[in-house]
Image (cartoon, rainbow, N blue to C red):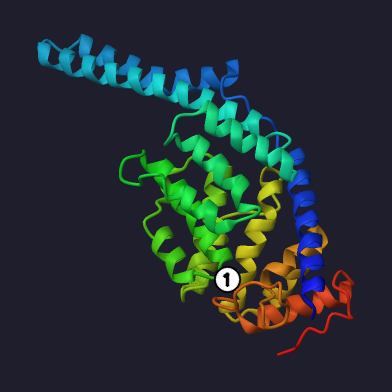
């Protein structure tokens, strides 16, 4: 294949990727963390336990209990202030990312993230890496590595680990991904979409590093047909495909591949390696049968020109 054909193919894939990302953003509901309903929920979650604690302390004679309760209350006030500030920063990041579906839009968003946020701000780092990943995954990985996992809150560290692991998986670096996901504690993530996203990345890393059965069991806890996970469905199905392939469940694997094709056949390109397509992914951690089935579906779909002389294994 000529260099010109490869370059043309890369440009075509880039345009298709931008189209997919734009459609995904349109589907994502705009969540306002500072909306009255969300603030009310946060107040109830924090206020009720504090109120109960003070009622109990009121009937205790010793002053030490009142002192302890005062310290607890002060700490919760501090956490609340931090949560509100973090929510405001996150909301601002979401606004910046709107419209960042083109190279020029991404450039403007990156400049705004650099100018509007302090160095080391986790929300800004996540957003910056998300934009960089569309053109240079390795650069995005270096950006995410700026987050000190030992200094940020546990749930933020989990998210940073997962995002880094996802990039390693895209690059075929399965051992590095596995080392990052193993310390993730899914039980500390109560928000359903966040937990589902983390679950899919953890499961894919497990499946591609010798723990396929464990990955299948983990993914069984997530219903990818739930409307709440609509924008996460491609990622969940991708993880299922790897898990079923390495668990030697070819029937379930094929079913998942056709579900991905129904969403967008381009998603199947993530299973086709450089052995079959010069623009493919690294063969490391890709099951041969998974690649074969994905390749056959893509070729039959007509999305890849047959005149491209791709070698079959």
Mark 1 burial class by Cα count in 10 Å: few <14, some 14-19, many 20+:
many
- Residue drawn at (46%, 64%), measured in percent from left and top? 177
Q: Nearer the viewer, residue 2 or 267?
A: 2
156 lies above or below 243: above
Q: In terms of depth relative to the viewer, which is nearer, 306 or 104?
A: 104
Q: Does residue 256 appear anywhere in the picture?
A: no
113 lies left or right of 228: left
Viewer-nearest residue: 28 or 123: 123
In the rendered image of this protein, does residue 79 appear above or below residue 28?
Answer: above
| Residue under the image location 19 percent in, 10 percent down | 59
Asked if residue 45 can be seen in this view, the reply is yes
Residue identifier under label 1 = 243
Residue 235, quarter of picture: bottom right
Residue 49 placement (x, y as % from top left): 35, 21
| Residue shown at the point (70%, 47%) measured from the top left | 231
Compared with 108, 229 (above or below) is below
> Which residue is painted at 64% across and 54% down in the image?
223
Furthest residue toward bottom: 313
Q: Position of residue 201 (x, y in %)?
A: 53, 58
Q: Nearer the viewer, residue 133 or 59?
A: 133
Quarter of the picture containing the N terminus is bottom right
Q: Position of residue 216 (x, y in %)?
A: 55, 67
Describe residue 274's horizontal placement relative to residue 266 as left or right.
Answer: left
Image position of 98 (left or right of 175): right
């Amino acid at each position: 294949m000529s260099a010109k054909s490869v370059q043309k193919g890369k440009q075509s894939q880039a345009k298709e990727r931008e189209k997919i990302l734009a459609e995904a953003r349109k589907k994502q509901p705009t969540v306002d963390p500072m909306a009255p309903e969300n603030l009310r929920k946060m107040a109830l979650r924090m206020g009720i336990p504090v109120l109960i604690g003070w009622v109990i302390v009121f009937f205790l004679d010793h002053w030490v209990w009142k002192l302890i309760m005062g310290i607890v209350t002060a700490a919760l006030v501090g956490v609340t202030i931090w949560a509100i500030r973090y929510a405001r920063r996150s909301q601002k990041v979401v606004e910046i990312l709107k419209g960042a579906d083109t190279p020029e839009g991404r450039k403007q968003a990156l400049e705004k993230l650099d100018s509007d946020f302090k160095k080391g701000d986790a929300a800004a780092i996540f957003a910056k890496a998300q934009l960089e990943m569309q053109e240079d995954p390795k650069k995005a990985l270096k950006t995410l590595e700026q987050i000190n996992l030992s200094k940020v809150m546990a749930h933020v560290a989990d998210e940073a680990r997962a995002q880094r692991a996802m990039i390693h998986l895209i690059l075929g670096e399965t051992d590095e991904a596995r080392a990052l996901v193993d310390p993730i504690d899914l039980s500390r993530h109560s928000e359903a979409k966040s937990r589902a996203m983390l679950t899919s990345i953890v499961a894919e890393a497990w499946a591609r590093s010798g723990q396929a059965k464990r990955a299948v069991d983990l993914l069984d806890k997530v219903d990818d047909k739930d409307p709440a996970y609509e924008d996460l469905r491609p990622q969940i199905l991708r993880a299922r495909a790897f898990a079923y392939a390495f668990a030697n469940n070819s029937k379930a694997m094929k079913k998942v591949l056709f579900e991905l094709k129904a969403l967008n056949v381009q998603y199947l390109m993530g299973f086709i390696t450089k052995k079959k397509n010069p623009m493919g992914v690294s063969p490391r951690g890709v099951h041969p049968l998974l690649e074969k089935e994905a390749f056959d579906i893509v070729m039959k779909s007509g999305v890849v020109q047959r005149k491209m002389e791709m070698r079959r294994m």
